[in-house]
Amino acid sequence: MLELTDVEAWRSFASEQRSKGRRIGLVPTMGALHEGHVSLFRAAKGTSDVVIATIFVNPRQFHDTGDLERYPRTPERDRDLALACGVACLVSPTLDAMWPDYPAPTPTTVTLGALGEVFEGADRPGHFDGVASVVAKLFVITGPCRAYFGEKDFQQLAVIRQMVRDLSFDVDVVGQPIVRDDDGLALSSRNVLLSPEGRRQALGFSRALRHVAEASRSADAQRATLRSVLEDAGVDVAYVEVVDSSTLVPSRDDETGERRALVAGFVEGIRLIDNGPVEVVGR
């Protein structure tokens, strides 16, 4: 496995692979890799000739500096996992290479519209501008490729798809299903920050989603159920919503069909998110 930190070497490697007719699969990550990332590596490996993985903890997408400082970093484990999954090139660019002006604002950024201002964007101003800007850089440096993202960050996936469409990137964005632990908790790099009791509380997320998946109700009834189950589990709820899966527009109470339930909240001060399909029936 080739390990790079230099942006130009990364660009050259990707260009060389394409010149040989090889399809590139890109897996952007912030490290602290787990089985959810493994599923992305496997998907990329299955449909691409060469897998490039990036590890970069992007400060531009953290609204809370304390959250940035707490974000887990496991470089040696990450390297071993990427190697075991058949990643051909692991890129860990430096902060200076990605954001030369940091901590001063970067003059040129990607600014999103309404899709980036709701839910996670409403609670974390500027978050998705930071996400879109760094992913845009990853796409520009890598060049034409397939890029793999997990559905656990459902709004992020929608934002990236919108950016690719609006800015005409030569990138095929591929979403992969959420990977859960045996107890139902969606895999996340932040889970390691939870105490045993915090983890038990966090299981309220998957429990709430199971409740709404098991019965068709109106959108408002689904929202009420989500909030009730989360609060009973001890989660400090940030939001619960039932939305159109493509536009993320909240569902009206008279609508019928498959939608997506989005949930977010805090456990032991750690922000967690989850989502799942739900069937709504007009009241």
Image (tube, helix red, strand yellow):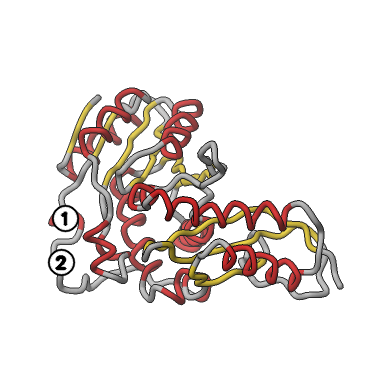
Foreground of the two, 148 or 144: 148
Q: Which residue is mark 2?
A: 102
Which amino acid does the dot numbered 1 rest on?
Answer: Leu
**What secondary structure is marked by label 1?**
helix
Left or right side of 255 for 136: left
Check the image and name the residue furthest to the front. Answer: 197
- Quadrant occupied by the C terminus: bottom right
Q: Which residue is mark 1?
A: 95
Which amino acid does the dot numbered 2 rest on?
Answer: Tyr
263 in relation to 193, above or below: below
Counting other residues with Cα less than 10 Å from the Cα at mark 1, is it few (<14), some (14-19), or many (20 or more)?
some
Instruction: Please name the residue shown 14% across and 62% down the image.
Output: 100
Name which of mark 1 and mark 2 comes first in the sequence: 1
**Disc 1 + disc 2, Cβ < 8 Å:** yes
Q: Residue 201: where, in percent of width, then height?
A: 50, 56
- Quadrant occupied by the N terminus: top left
CA distance for labels 1 and 2: 8 Å
**What secondary structure is marked by label 2?**
loop
Image quadrant where residue 129 sits = bottom left
210 in relation to 234, above or below: above
Q: Which mark is residue 162?
A: none
Instruction: Please name the residue shown 49% across and 63% down the image.
Output: 166
Foreground of the two, 268 or 209: 268
99 in relation to 27, above or below: below
